Amino acid sequence: MLDTTYDDETVYVTPKTETPTVEKKVLEKNDSSGGEGIWQDAADYDAGDTVSFRISAVLPGNIRSYEKYTVRLHDNLSSAFTYSNDAVIYSVNNGEKKNVTDVFSIQKDGTNLTFSCDNILLNENLSSADSLVVEYSAVRSMNSSSLCTARHSAFINIWNRVRTTGWSTR
């Protein structure tokens, strides 16, 4: 991908060097101990259990150099799950989490979930964020096998980011 800027007479084209990264985890709870659990790549759940998911997206450090930065985070649940309509989205800056759910649009289409914000740079808590975290839960279907393994690779679809800049002089 290329980044384009210009001044009065010259257009500058440089490669974009930073890309966001995304990671999905599932909360593994120990049924026998009832402890808090650990966020990891896979977990075992029985039919009827509520399963907690976390998607973390690390933002590139240079997003503030753009006039607009649109975030669209897509996730695809297995048909064995029913989304609980409880997503909470946080911006994270130096380890401090702030709830920014109200700035995002959350859409469900079948098993597809989309969390989007047209321009994160318009929100103070988002424009200074190091990363975004989406946490939500889904119920494991009673009609599925009695034990399942939820793997993050089966449910994460894509981090689809759109970066646009207006013409500006630097």
Image (cartoon, rainbow, N blue to C red):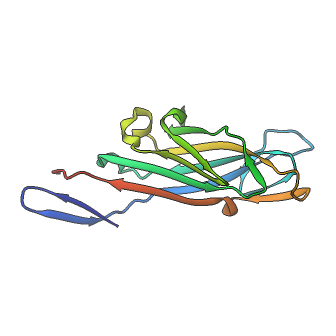
Q: Residue at x 51, y 39 (%)?
A: 92
* Residue 170 location (% of width, % of height): 17, 51
Q: How many marks?
A: 0
Instruction: Decide which of 30, 69 is in the foreground and name it.
Output: 69
Q: Residue at x 49, y 51 (%)?
A: 72
* Residue 4 location (% of width, % of height): 24, 61
Corner quadrant of residue 49 = top right
Q: Tell me if I can see residue 3 in this picture.
A: yes
Answer above or below: position of 80 versus 51: below
Q: Tell me if I can see residue 128 in this picture.
A: no
User: Quick one: quadrant of the N terminus?
Assistant: bottom left
- Horizontally, is 84 left or right of 69 in the view? right
- Horizontally, is 63 left or right of 95 in the view? left
Answer above or below: position of 154 versus 95: below
* Residue 114 location (% of width, % of height): 56, 50
Corner quadrant of residue 149 = bottom right
Q: Residue at x 41, y 49 (%)?
A: 70
- Name, please, the residue furthest toward the left: 9
Instruction: Decide which of 47, 112 is in the foreground and name it.
Output: 112
* Residue 97 location (% of width, % of height): 55, 34
Q: Residue at x 36, y 55 (%)?
A: 163
